[in-house]
Each structure stands twice: as C-alpha cells, then as structure tokens.
Image (cartoon, rainbow, N blue to C red):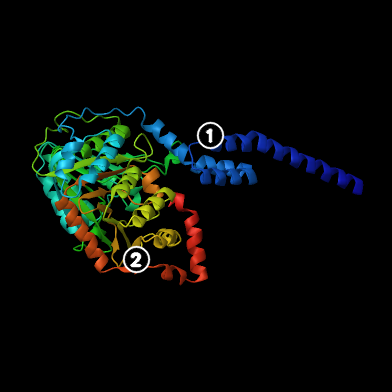
Amino acid sequence: MQTLYDAVVHEEGWLYIVLLVLTYLLIGIPTALHAIFSDRDVRSTIAWMGLIWLTPLVGAILYALFGVNRIRRAALRLRDDVPKPDVPQTTKPITDEALWQIHEAGHGHLATLEQLVRRLTRHPLHTGNTITHLTGGDEAYPAMLAAIEGAGQSITLSSYIFDNDEAGTMFADALEAAQSRGVEIRVLIDAVGARYSRPTMVRVLRRRGIRVAKFLSSISPTMIRFFNLRNHRKILVVDGQIGFTGGMNIRACCMTTSDEEHDTQDLHFRIEGPAVADLQHAFSIDWAFSTDELLQGPLWFQQIDSPGDSLARGISDGPDEDMDHLRLTFMGALSCARRRVQIVTPYFLPEGPLIDALNVCAMRGVEVDVILPSKNNLPFVHWAMLASVAPLLKRGVRIWLTPPPFDHTKLMIVDGAWCCFGSTNWDPRSLRLNFEFNVECYDREVAGKMSQLAQDKIATAKRLTLKDLRARSRLSRLRDGIARLFLPYL
C-alpha cells in the first residue's frame, strides 16, 4: 500500500512540474515578452515581470485586464472609424511673434507653451473670445438654462453625470421646450455616470422624445472590457455660438437652493467666440462614435463673431489619438512658469513624471500651490493622496486642504496670465483612461480672476506639512499605503 501511495504522489508531483513548465512556456514567457516590448516605463515593466514570473497565470490575467497599452489599443480600435466633422476655419493661426507681443508685459515666455499645445492638438489658438466663470450650480445652471431657452437652431449637451433630480428636471424641461420650438437637440450621457440616479435621465429624456445616447454602455459581455473608458467631458453648445464647459455635472448637490445638502462646490465657464467650435468638435466626434450620426454644417457649426479679447483653445484628451495631451500640457506649463503656479483639483494622485515636474518647478523658485479638499467624497483617494505627497512637500510644493463642502473645482493658473480649466483631474484615471476636455486661456484678466479665486480658497485652508504626515498613526499610514497601491486605477 505504501509503495502504491508513493507512486501516486510521485506521479502527481511530476504532473505538477509539467503543468508549471507548460504554464510558463505558453503563458508566462509570451506575457513577459509582451511587457518588455510594450511602451512602458522601466519600473512598471519590472513590476509586471515580477508578478508574471511569480504567478504566471494570475499575472497574465491581471496584465491583460489592466495593462494601459491594451486599454489604449481598445480605444483606438473603438474610435478608429469614427468620422470627423468638417469644422469651418474661424481663426487665422496666431504666430509666435504675435503671441509674444500680446504678452510682452512679462508674459512672453508663454509663447513656448502655446507652441507646445498647438503641436499636440494640431488646432489653432483662437482669438476674440469672451470667457466668464460661473461659481456653483447657483450661477452656472441659470446661465446654461437661459442659453437653452434662447436656442433657435441646435443644442448639444454632454455630461458624465446627469441626475434625475431637481437640477436634472430643470434641464429636461428646458430641453423639451426647446425641442417643441423646432430646435435640434442631441444629448450624450456616459453609461456609468447615467446610473447615479434612478430612473436614469436617459430613460426620462427618451420618454420626452429627446434624442439621447449613452457613451459606451458596459452591460453587454462584449463591452464590459471597456468599462474603464469613460466620457468625463462636460460640454454644452447652443446654436454653435455659445459654449459652456468646466468640471460641473448636472446634479442638485451643486445648488445651495436645493432641498439636498449643499455638499459640492464647483466651477464652470461660459464661452463666446471661435473657441466654441472646439467644444462642438469634441462633442460631434463622441456623438458620431456613439450613434454613427455625423453632425456638421451650419446647423451645428457657425461662423462665429469675435466678441472678446481672450486667446483660447480646446484640448481633447483620451486613451486614443489624443492620449497625453493634457498631461504634457500640464508639464509644459510647469516648465515655463516663472513666478507662481496654482492648482485646484478634487483628486490629486500625480504619477512619477508629474511629481518630478512639480518638484523641479518648485526648486527653480516658483511658488507652487496645490489646493485640495480636506474631506474627499472618495475617502480612499484621499488616503492614497496622503501616502503620495511627501516627495512634493520635501521639495517645497505647498499643499492646502480646504474645509467642507467638498470642492470639485478643476483649475490650473500660471503666472496670473494663463489658465486651464475643464473636466480633468490630476490622477491616472483622468490622464490615462477617461475622455476629457479642457480649455486653455491666455488672458491676464481671466487668469488674474482665477488666481484670486485660488488665493481665496487658500485663505480658508490648512496647510499640509511633513509633520502632519508623520503624526499619523501606524494604522492610518498602513491604510494610506495600501490605498496608494491602487493608484493606477483610482
């Protein structure tokens, strides 16, 4: 009996070894080679290699599921055949010399930033825009609703979250009234963001006969692999003439007049001028991708007057041909800053290159202020942030934590002369996975107002120090460190 037992064990042992060798040969080695040949930084490649060699089957599955290069290829395949609208040329490309003259009062160095973004986006900088900031839903929603009520031809609206609540109902009513006047309407809501309320606003709008679509529904088995590719853009364009964009979703918590607790501060912008075409262009591509309908012609794109003095340009970003546009824009802005950089963001989880850029900027003598909410609506993001910012504090970057309510503002200002606003957060999800839209503006008046807004937030904030980080309990530091491990996916 003992001899038979030894034989079985011996045979099973050899079988285990054979299966392990086959797993390495058929799964581990090909996956490791793929990681080596992929366009990744060295630390990321080493991490994936270690996981693959230690657990070839599990490591290969995780690599297939969460490899960013796979996500980018998926996005490129998804959107490769999306038709592009013919956008009328509304602006003569501005020359470096003209930009230098406009900013000759100490801001000519921003001409290099303009050149960088022009080469990234392949879109011209638009002259003659008027840009107005709108604080919270109390200012933004009435302005947006007034524009919708004044629409005569067309309305395009894109939002990550469009809740079926007090705020959402006001917009649904306004859209329905506009449609009854004969206005052509297209509404695009992200499939994940649409689920924040029930019944969804998609269903409500369809019942009212309004043309609405979901971006990348992830319910079907064939689409679940694209769950991470979300449309985070917030865009409203009326008659191709007036545009709104920024960080604000459509939900009652942004309004102090709502019955709900006022728990979200935010910032939005009204734009008039040629830059509105960039908003419409971004929406039209997303709409064509979601519905196969191409929006073009004078109904959607107008020859726009130049009512103001702001230089502005839209910047689309996403895991497709627009990947890294905003990350490189942020790095370019940090590299050319001379006096002060102010960053307001709800989610701050910069990866290595951005941490280096922030540190180098601060070490050159530039004042770098990062303004974050002290109480985040996503606690694990706050924990990961606390575990990540020590290298910045050591190099002189100042981090400020603002008191409640939660601040969802997304803003960057350089030298009081350039600002960038839109939907993008300073985290890997925004900068690598989501489809985002921002606007850069070269205007001392607009940027000056935004700089003062940031300074007003600092006035009520508490500065985060290395002493504060070290004073945390061991249990808190362990919690924060574990949260930081999930940084690429937060």
Q: Please state which of residues 7 and 317 is positioned toward the viewer in this rendering.
A: 317
Residue at left offset 18%, top offset 33%:
93
Question: Mark 2 sits on what residue?
Answer: 374
Q: Secondary structure at mark 1?
A: helix
Q: Nearer the viewer, mark 2 or mark 1?
A: 1
Q: Label 1 amino acid?
A: Phe
64, above or below 298, in the image? below
Q: Secondary structure at mark 2?
A: loop
Q: CA distance from mark 2 to mark 1?
A: 41 Å
Asked which quadrant contains residue 121, the reply is top left
- Characterize the local packing of mark 1: few (<14), some (14-19) or many (20 or more) Cα atoms within 10 angstroms: few
344, above or below 433, in the image? below
Residue at left offset 62%, top offset 38%:
28
Residue 17, image x, y percentages: 75, 41
Question: Mark 1 sits on what residue?
Answer: 37
Determine contact: label 2, label 1, CB under 8 Å. Answer: no
Q: Label 2 amino acid?
A: Ser
In the image, 486: left or right of 252? Answer: right
Residue at left offset 22%, top offset 64%:
456
In the image, 429: left or right of 28? Answer: left
Residue at left offset 39%, top offset 59%:
378
Residue 379, image x, y percentages: 41, 62
In this view of the protein, can residue 247 be seen by the observer? yes
Asked which quadrant contains residue 128, the reply is top left
Residue 204, image x, y percentages: 25, 46
In this view of the protein, can residue 261 be seen by the observer? no
Residue 89, image x, y percentages: 17, 30
Marker disc for residue 96: none
Q: What is the total number of numbered labels drawn onto the structure image?
A: 2
- Characterize the local packing of mark 2: few (<14), some (14-19) or many (20 or more) Cα atoms within 10 angstroms: some
